[in-house]
Image (tube, coloured by chain):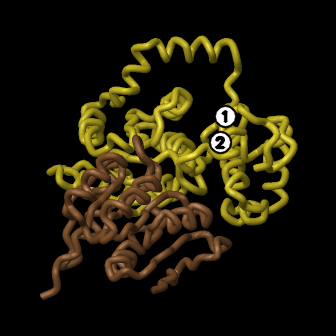
Amino acid sequence: MKTRILLADDHEIVRRGLSALLQKHEGWEICGEAIDGREAVDKAKQLKPDVVIIDIGMPNLNGLDATRRILQQDPNSRVIVLTVTDADQVIREALDAGARGFVLKSDAARDLVSAIEALQGKRMFFTPRVNELLLAGFLEKGQTMSRNQPPMLPTLTAREREITQLLAEGRSSKEAASLLNLSTKTVETHRSNIMRKLSLHSIRDLVVYAIKNKIIQIDMPPETNELAAVVSGQRTDSPV
Amino acid sequence: MAANTRILLVDDHPIVREGLRTVLQRRAGWEVVGEAANGVEALEQVERLQPDVMVLDITMPRLNGLEVCRLARQKTPTTEILFVTQHDSPQMMKEALNAGAKGYVVKSNAARDLVHAIEAVSQHRTFTAMTRPESGSTSDSPARNS
């Protein structure tokens, strides 16, 4: 029986590249594709793939929150997260979300086949760079940190994170309500709760929070821009 | 018979280069003559291969695409440069064209726009296409100027 794979990435050119790579492998088939996290969750439920390959930075619902939902729907799902960065926080988030594989996009052509084979054998797969971090005591440090300071993200519910992403992407409460099949009033109530919980005072604050916590990702031009400086903490007073 | 259009692909992600290839290989008369994974490699390849079109990413290690574009225009002025980038920004597009590029396509639309863009730039016509309606560029009907 063939191993059925669901691909989720908002860039068609990347999906084509992944598809071309994986279809060379006998016994594997691409059973579906998704262009954002929301579609990935729906297609995972509908198609029940053996493996889901999911990009982190996607519109509407990011790959990490989509992974959480896919695993809520079916705890036996096997998800490989594709990412452009192996920053500590992203790795920790991916593991917390329940991903069993972590592959850098830059290394996907080399690592993805091994990652799928590992998951088929009920094992996990990390890129060499992640393994290096693990060996360097990353997890121990993370556990120490989590004992000492409460993580920021769990303070929001899944629905609140979803609304945070939509608002930070520039959608109005009305547009978010329409996408989520909720009333505008309900979204506005969530919005107030989000702002209160996180002690935020403006949409600008919300955008910065969403970027810092990898709920959304921004394009970084070759030169550091003002927003990058704000997010990295070098500046706190710049308008977004 | 018309000569092949020779294309060099430059992107630091092999999976993106593979995706670009799948779009281009369906076209008779187009040939991907080389690939490069960073800016320095791109400059070496463009000088050696003298392709008709270089498909170029902006954010890359060692030397970014804008610098590659400026230098390549000096070294091999016959090669037209088409940016395929994640930067959906009119400022970045302007900078790319100022650097000497003939075309600018956003990665999220590359599967749709790439063929039209290469057709245009290989005939020395400008092609730009972005997704943001407020950017001043077109979305569904990419601008083509001679």
Which residue in the structure is indicated by mark 2? A228
State whether residue A79 is above or below residue A35: above
Residue A46 visible at all: no
Q: Secondary structure at mark 2?
A: helix
Badge 2: chain ID: A
Residue occupying image coordinates x 73% and y 54%:
A167
Q: Residues within 10 Å of mark 2 (few under 14, many from 20)?
A: many
Image position of A76 (left or right of A203)? left
Q: Residue A235: x and y, percent?
A: 75, 35
Tell which of B32 and B44 is nearer to you.
B44
Query: Do the CB atoms of the residues marked 1 and 2 lie less than 8 Å apart?
Result: yes
Q: Secondary structure at mark 1?
A: loop
Which residue in the structure is indicated by mark 1? A232
Tell which of B73 and B87 is nearer to you.
B73
State whether residue B121 is above or below residue A36: below
Q: Residue B40: x and y, percent?
A: 33, 46
Chain B drawing hue? brown
Residue occupying image coordinates x 59% and y 47%:
A217
> Residue A102, located in which quarter of the rendered image?
top left
Task: Tell me the CA gap for discs 1 and 2.
Answer: 6 Å
> Residue A212, located in which quarter of the rendered image?
top right
Residue A83 visible at all: yes
Residue occupying image coordinates x 50% and y 52%:
A41
Badge 1: chain ID: A
- Which amino acid type corresponds to the residue marked 2 in the rendered image? Ala
Q: Residues within 10 Å of mark 1 (few under 14, many from 20)?
A: few
Q: Residue A211: x and y, percent?
A: 65, 42
